[in-house]
């Protein structure tokens, strides 16, 4: 079952009406005090950057009351990104009493000001009737508008909605999911890369192409996506989509299993006992020399829970 609320936190920084959010530079610990001084003096760009740092735990421990302290004044003053981010907090009840209606209002204002991630969140809330009457067609249209303007998370969200059916709200259509999954995958999004791998492996909305599937699985696996690591290991072990490579296969299966991916753990248990001692040694050497990416990462974009395709990439804020 899909999550009840799937939001994307605004990551943009400044100008109203731009075509794409621009992420602010990472906040350094040294820069925090300077930001505090500027924010306290009424600099809403600084207030947004500081509040975002506390919301996301960047350079500081995550602190929702502090995030609200700096984001709310900037949002009330009409700072576009702050409205989108504080609206997200308000809708979800993060560090503040939940109020989806006010949260939606702030998010809509941010979207109207050109913040694409807010446009995506407005679409998600409209699609699912959160803080506003449910309207599937309008919700999809809003998300599509953000996706068409290059917002990668919106592209992934559309691919997910069409591929999985959005809990029965959207008619499942693998062909409709395919172009958005491909766009996001080519932009480097690991969840989308894994989805494209799945679609190519099984011929779901894309021509069956085991070699292409292996390529996209590898792209996502290298970014730490556990589901892709599992699938890549499986294909390498069987030789589907390329030559058999048992050492490489076990390397990726162990990587996925280390992140708790169920398929990787199950398949690994089935094949590991059949390894020759020298193969076991080679796998362990490879793991020591080149620790697999993503181990210990719990973000949905990397971990990818839920067979056969992981759910969306949205932060658990």
Image: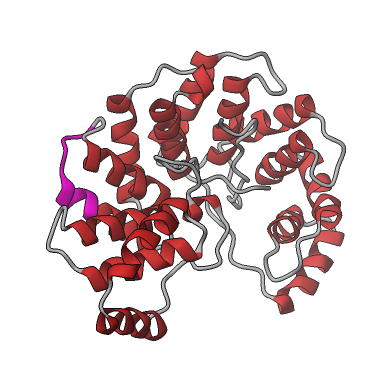
Magenta region includes residue 207: yes
**Residue depicted at 70% across the width and 63% down the height:** 57
Task: Tell me the quarter of the picture where residue 188 sits.
Answer: bottom left
Image coords of residue 114 (percent x, y): 56, 36
Image coords of residue 107 (percent x, y): 67, 33
Q: What's the magenta region?
A: 206-214
Image coords of residue 181 (percent x, y): 34, 39
Task: Tell me the quarter of the picture where residue 93 sits.
Answer: top right
**Residue depicted at 69% across the width and 23% down the height:** 130
Q: What color scheme is it?
A: secondary structure
Q: Report the residue that reaches farthest toward the left.
A: 243
96 or 234: nearer the viewer: 234
262 or 80: nearer the viewer: 262
Answer above or below: position of 316 versus 60.
above
**Residue depicted at 15% across the width and 64% down the height:** 244
Image coords of residue 237 (percent x, y): 23, 61
Task: Say which quadrant the N terminus sits in.
Answer: top right
How many badges with numbers are in the image? 0
Magenta region includes residue 291: no
Answer above or below: position of 236 versus 289.
above
30 or 172: nearer the viewer: 172
Q: Is residue 126 left or right of residue 311?
A: right
Q: Is residue 64 left or right of residue 188?
A: right
Task: Tell me the quarter of the picture where residue 275 sits.
Answer: bottom left
**Residue depicted at 53% across the width and 38% down the height:** 116
Q: Is residue 34 left or right of residue 168?
A: right
258 or 32: nearer the viewer: 258
């Amino acid at each position: 079952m899909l999550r009840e609320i799937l939001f994307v936190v605004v990551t943009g920084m400044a100008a109203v009406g731009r075509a794409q959010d621009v992420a602010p530079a990472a906040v350094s610990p040294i820069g925090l005090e300077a930001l505090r001084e500027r924010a306290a003096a009424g600099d809403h760009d600084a207030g947004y950057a500081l509040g975002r740092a506390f919301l996301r735990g960047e350079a500081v421990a995550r602190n929702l009351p502090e995030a609200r302290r700096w984001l709310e004044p900037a949002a009330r003053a009409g700072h576009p990104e702050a409205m989108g981010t504080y609206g997200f907090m308000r809708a979800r009840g993060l560090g503040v009493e939940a109020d989806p209606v006010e949260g939606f209002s702030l998010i809509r204002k941010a979207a109207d000001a050109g913040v694409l991630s807010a446009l995506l969140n407005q679409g998600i809330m409209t699609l699912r009737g959160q803080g506003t009457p449910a309207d599937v067609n309008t919700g999809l249209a809003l998300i599509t508008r953000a996706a068409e303007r290059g917002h990668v998370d919106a592209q992934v969200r559309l691919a997910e909605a069409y591929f999985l059916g959005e809990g029965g709200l959207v008619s499942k259509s693998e062909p409709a999911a395919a172009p958005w999954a491909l766009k996001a995958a080519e932009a480097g999004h690991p969840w989308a890369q894994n989805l494209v791998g799945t679609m190519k492996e099984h011929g779901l909305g894309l021509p069956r192409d085991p070699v292409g599937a292996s390529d996209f699985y590898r792209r996502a696996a290298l970014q730490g996506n556990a589901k892709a690591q599992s699938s890549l290991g499986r294909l390498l072990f069987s030789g589907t989509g390329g030559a058999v490579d048992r050492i490489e296969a076990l390397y990726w299966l162990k990587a996925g299993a280390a992140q708790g991916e169920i398929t990787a753990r199950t398949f690994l248990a089935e094949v590991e006992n059949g390894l020759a001692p020298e193969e076991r040694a080679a796998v362990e050497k490879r793991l020591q020399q080149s620790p697999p990416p993503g181990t210990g990462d719990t973000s949905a974009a990397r971990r990818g829970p839920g067979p056969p395709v992981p759910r969306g990439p949205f932060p658990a804020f």
